Image: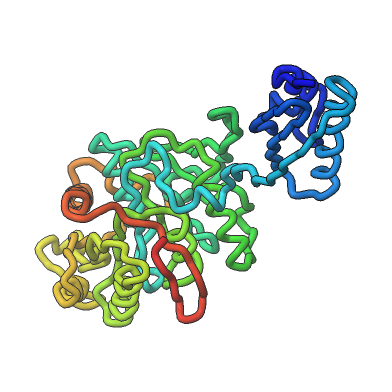
């Protein structure tokens, strides 16, 4: 008796493979059917390696052909297992650019207390005032201060639907989109987390947020050169890094380490330059006098020594501190020396980003292979 391929396929349509939800032909499990007289060869590809499912599929094929086509057919089943393509999870999309975000700038400092968050907030506000679309990710998990500086510490991000998924909507003020762990904790609540928990929280604020279109995302990193820094650089391709320091030697020593971290061959994030904060003090009653309380031009000399750009200096002014405490960045004060200083600084940062993008290939996120000796290799 000569068997017909169409009859075999019709019989196989009555079989459902466990876990597929469709019949064997519709699901694509049947890759080929060959007939020679009363002989039949069926090529099957399953997505599960479970032995009992494979055996069941083989038995079902033989039974269907014998019962529905020809009971004396000689049936051979060639069965192969292929794992389905894995659906991308959070850890699989890490390291890839976030759609809609053009430049990601890490703002870092080796030493705490040098005004890194203040510089980040004023830089973001000035960029927004210039017409750029700006976001700030407050990555200082253990000491988040950006919500206070933007007067949104009592706000809570809402959930919005984007591409069928629920995502956090960043809080927005002064034209800047903001996400911070400070939105999810009480003012008197200490964040006592180990590194992996902190990294998971950061990844949620990065990948599970509806950032939309941004020209610049500024990441306010914690002080030092530790686990959070590595987690950020593992998660995102950083366009470039900005280092903030005061002129004093203690701060400069740590700033030097911050530059060295980004310039490691295994990390290789371009350093856009160094900013000198609290450069000098000028009292109102003596507007022509400059008092170099923390030293003179230390960050400028460090930039020259390390052959990285010097982006500018910000004076030590009481109104900057007061504006930060009040939740309105000082750079928004019009027609003031502070506004002018931050505008000059911001223009220099933008120019260095343009130079970096014109002359260097896109930064790759790093893949951490071992924490010993802060070892890392490029992905």
Quarter of the image for residue 70 reads: top right
Which residue is rendered at x = 29% and y = 61% of the image? 242
From this viewpoint, which residue is outermost toward the left?
288
Image side of residue 256 versus residue 144, left or right: left
The picture places residue 377, in percent across and down from the top left corner, at 41, 68
Q: How many marks?
A: 0
Q: In this view, does 26 lie above or below 288?
A: above
**5 vs 261, nearest the viewer:** 5
- Scheme by which the image is coloured: rainbow
Q: Is residue 252 above or below residue 127?
A: below
Query: In the drawing, does residue 43 fall left or right of residue 121?
Result: right
Q: Which quarter of the rendered picture does the C terminus lie within?
A: bottom left
- Which image quarter is the N terminus in? top right
Residue 302 in the image, given as x and y percentages of width and height: 20, 75
Q: Which residue is drawn at 55% across and 40% down?
A: 155
Q: Which of 154 and 285 is in front in this view?
A: 154
Horizontal side of residue 181 vs 324, given as left or right: right
Q: x, y percentage for residue 253?
A: 30, 81
Give the answer, above or below, for where 374 lies relative to 20: below
Q: Can residue 36 be seen in this view?
A: yes
Q: Residue 86's quadrant in the figure?
A: top right
**Of the pair 168 and 51, the residue shown nearer to us:** 51
The percent coordinates of residue 311 (x first, y second) are 19, 60
Res. 291 in view: no
The vertical placement of 162 against 48, above or below, is above
**Quarter-wise, where is residue 287 in the image?**
bottom left
> Which residue: 75% across, 33% down?
20
């Amino acid at each position: 008796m000569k068997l017909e391929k169409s009859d075999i396929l019709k019989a196989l349509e009555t079989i459902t493979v466990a876990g597929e939800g469709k019949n064997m032909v519709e699901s694509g499990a049947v890759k080929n059917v060959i007939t020679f007289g009363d002989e039949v060869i069926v090529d099957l590809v399953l997505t599960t390696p479970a032995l009992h499912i494979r055996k069941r599929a083989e038995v079902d094929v033989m039974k269907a052909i014998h019962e529905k086509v020809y009971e004396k057919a000689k049936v051979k089943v060639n069965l192969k297992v292929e794992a389905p393509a894995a659906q991308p999870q959070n850890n699989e999309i890490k390291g890839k650019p976030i759609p809609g975000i053009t430049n990601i700038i890490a703002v870092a400092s080796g030493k705490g207390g040098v005004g890194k968050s203040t510089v980040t907030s004023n830089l973001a506000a000035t960029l927004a005032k210039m017409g750029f679309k700006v976001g700030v990710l407050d990555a200082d998990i253990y000491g988040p201060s950006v919500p206070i500086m933007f007067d949104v510490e009592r706000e809570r991000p809402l959930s919005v639907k984007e591409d069928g998924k629920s995502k956090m909507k960043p809080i927005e003020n002064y034209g800047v989109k903001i996400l911070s762990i400070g939105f999810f904790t009480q003012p008197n609540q200490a964040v006592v987390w180990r590194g992996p928990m902190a990294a998971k929280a950061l990844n949620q604020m990065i990948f599970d947020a509806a950032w939309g279109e941004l020209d610049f995302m500024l990441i306010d990193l914690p002080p030092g050169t530790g686990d959070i820094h590595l987690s950020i650089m593992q998660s995102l391709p950083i366009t470039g890094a900005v280092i903030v320091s005061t002129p004093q030697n203690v701060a400069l020593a740590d700033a030097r380490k911050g530059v060295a971290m980004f310039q490691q061959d295994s990390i290789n994030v371009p350093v856009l330059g160094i900013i000198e904060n609290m450069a000098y003090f000028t009292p109102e009653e003596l507007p022509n006098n400059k008092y170099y309380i923390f030293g003179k031009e230390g960050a400028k000399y460090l930039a020259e020594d390390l052959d990285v750009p010097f982006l500018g200096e910000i004076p030590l002014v009481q109104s900057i501190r007061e504006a930060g405490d009040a939740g309105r960045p000082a750079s928004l004060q019009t027609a003031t020396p502070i506004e002018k200083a931050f505008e000059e600084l911001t223009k220099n940062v933008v120019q260095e980003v343009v130079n970096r993008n014109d002359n260097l290939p896109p930064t790759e996120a790093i893949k951490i292979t071992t924490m010993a000796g802060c070892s890392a290799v490029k992905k």
